[in-house]
Amino acid sequence: MNDRAATRPSRSAARSMRRPNRFIAPIGATLPAIFADDDLAQRFVAGLDGRIGEGWTWQAYYQYGQNEQDSKLHNNRIAANYARAVSSVLVGGVPTCSVNADANPANDDPACVPINLFGFGSPSAEALDYIHATSWRLVDLEQNAAAFDLQGTPFATWAGPVSIATGLARWAWKPASSARARSDSCPYPVTAIRRVLARLGVARMRSASS
């Protein structure tokens, strides 16, 4: 086989796309939940092809892809704080959270602010701050793919030329995720994200083995 290779100029392509989304959902008498989702997708591709001697051709390519999803849920109600805030009593004529007024000091919450869900000007800004939090999730998916193909006609028989084709391909997928650790306010717990990514990994393994 002749080692001389005549190659064409490389072909490459790159694509990047960002898609912001925003969704507002009312949640009763408290602040509306605001969901903001920012997706960034990028892909870079490069390829080469050429000839080796007489009758042999080859093609090769490499592709890199990345998808980043940044999701935030603003004004997400904290269930435990909300339960403490709506349960209040008057102590000396002052609204006080029940957990701070009962006889059990073990359940006290100095940060608790009683919330009034009725009347003009209610709830107060302090109470809204106490029962709400911002949850977030960041998922980063990265993919690398490469392939090399070789075709040729090394010899001929009485029936005509004999063609041979072979190739190699590799595909690698790398997931990463992070989320707010607070389970009572985060709608995207880390364990759930890992479970989804694990299922995707199993699907990928099954596809590769089939």
Image (cartoon, helix red, strand yellow):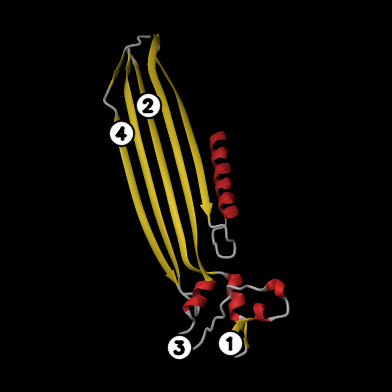
Mark 3 or 4, nearer chain start: 4
Measuring from the top left, give residue 79's x and y in whole percent: 59, 71
Depicted 24 relative to depicted 119: above or below? above
Marks 1 & 2, CB-CB < 8 Å contact: no
Q: Residue furthest right?
A: 103
Q: Which amino acid type corresponds to the residue marked 1 in the rendered image?
A: Val
In this rendering, which labeled residue sits more in front, label 2 or label 3? Answer: 3
Which amino acid, by three-letter code, is at mark 4? Ser
> What is the spatial separation of the Cα atoms under label 1 and label 3, in whole angstroms?
18 Å
| SS type, badge 1 | strand
SS at badge 4: strand
Residue extending furthest toward the bottom: 93
Q: Quadrant of residue 131?
A: bottom right
Residue beneath the point at 47% across and 77% down: 125
Rendered image quadrant of residue 51:
top left
The answer, for residue 64, to whether it is visible in the render is yes
Q: Nearer the viewer, residue 149 or 99?
A: 99
Q: CA distance from mark 4 to mark 2?
A: 12 Å
Q: Residue furthest left?
A: 9
Q: Nearer the viewer, mark 4 or mark 1?
A: 1
Q: From the image, tell me which residue sits under label 2.
A: 60
Mark before the other along the chain sequence, 2 or 3: 2
**Mark closer to the chain start, 1 or 2:** 2
Q: Quadrant of the C terminus?
A: top right
Query: According to the image, label 4 marks what residue?
Result: 12
Of badges 4 and 2, the one in the foreground is 4
Q: Which mark is residue 94?
A: 1
Q: Mark 4, residues whose alpha carbon is within 10 Å: few (<14), some, or many (≥20)?
A: few
The residue tagged 3 is: 120
Badge 4 or badge 2: first in the primary sequence: 4
SS at mark 3? loop
Residue contact between numbered discs 4 and 1, judged by CB atoms under 8 Å: no
